[in-house]
Image (cartoon, rainbow, N blue to C red):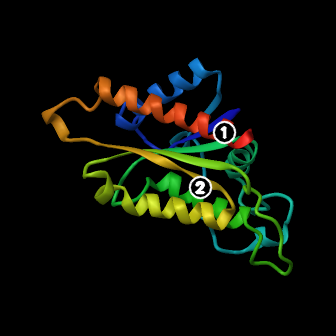
């Protein structure tokens, strides 16, 4: 079993990273293989809307020469895609948005001369998110976007783990959050195992 993490925070020691570190440690305990890519260290340009990808049915087929195809292949080759992002302006960070814009068009061949497959079909997606508001208000649009991404691309949505930062009044991480995000990792693995029986 392999989880592919899309780290969408610019802060390598921030709140999202703090949750993600506990998640990854639990994956290691469970024997789940993980790969993490930091999107702020990659070059993924915004989608050009040129639709060239639609005439390439067996691969992304994007005309841009950047890191997108390498990341997309890793997404297609895993069991679970894990976008991890703070919420900026009620949605994910810009590098995450650019990646998902391109992944949904290059990955779903619905718009060309010939209908083709959804290249991420059968993958699963589970998100780790931080925000400054109650999760239903701060991350609700992001979660709805992920659900629609999954429906359109043929992925199974497995849920979102979101925690709020209350600012400097109290530390972001505590034992309860450490336990809860580890439980989230376990729940994903158990759900997959149950589906395989």
> How packed is label 1: few (under 14 Cα within 10 Å), some, or many (20 or more)?
few
Q: Position of residue 26 (x, y in %)?
A: 52, 23
The reply to whether the C-beta atoms of the residues labelled 2 and 1 are less than 8 Å apart is no
Front-lying residue, 132 or 136: 136
Q: Is residue 52 above or below residue 36?
A: below
Instruction: Give the distance between the C-alpha atoms of the residues marked 2 and 1, in whole angstroms.
Output: 30 Å
Q: Is residue 38 above or below residue 72?
A: above
Q: Which secondary structure, mark 1?
A: helix
Q: Position of residue 60 (x, y in %)?
A: 77, 59
In the picture, measured across the screen, residue 186 lies left or right of residue 69, that is: left
> How packed is label 2: few (under 14 Cα within 10 Å), some, or many (20 or more)?
many
Q: Is residue 195 above or below residue 21?
A: below
- Picture residue at 65% right of the left edge, 63% below the top: 104
In the picture, measured across the screen, residue 163 lies left or right of residue 9, that is: left
Q: Position of residue 100 (x, y in %)?
A: 58, 58
Quadrant of the image containing the C terminus: top right
- Picture residue at 40% right of the left edge, 63% below the top: 141
Q: Residue furthest top?
A: 29
Residue 45, visible in the rendered structure: no
Residue 195, visible in the rendered structure: yes
In the rendered image, which residue does mark 2 sit on?
Answer: 99
In the rendered image, which residue does mark 1 sit on?
Answer: 194
Residue 130 placement: quadrant: top left
Front-lying residue, 3 or 41: 3
- Picture residue at 67% right of the left edge, 36% below the top: 193
Residue 159, label in figure: none
Q: Which secondary structure, mark 2?
A: helix
Q: Position of residue 181 (x, y in %)?
A: 43, 33
């Amino acid at each position: 079993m392999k989880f592919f993490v899309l780290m969408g925070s610019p802060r390598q020691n921030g709140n999202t990273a703090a949750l993600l570190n506990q998640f990854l440690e639990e994956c290691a305990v469970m024997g789940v293989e993980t790969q993490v890519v930091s999107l702020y260290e990659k070059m993924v340009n915004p989608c050009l809307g040129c639709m060239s990808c639609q005439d390439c049915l067996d691969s992304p087929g994007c005309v841009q020469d950047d890191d997108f195809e390498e990341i997309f292949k890793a997404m297609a080759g895993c069991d679970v895609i894990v976008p991890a992002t703070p919420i900026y302006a009620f949605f994910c960070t810009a590098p995450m948005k650019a990646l998902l814009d391109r992944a949904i068009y290059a990955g779903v061949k619905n718009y060309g001369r010939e209908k083709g497959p959804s290249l991420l079909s059968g993958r699963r997606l589970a998100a780790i998110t931080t925000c400054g508001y109650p999760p239903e208000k701060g991350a609700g649009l992001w979660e709805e976007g992920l659900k629609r991404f999954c429906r359109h691309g043929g992925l199974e949505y497995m849920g979102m783990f979101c925690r709020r930062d209350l600012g400097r009044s109290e530390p972001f991480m505590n034992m309860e959050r450490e336990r809860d995000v580890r439980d989230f990792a376990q729940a994903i693995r158990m759900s997959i195992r149950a589906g395989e029986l």
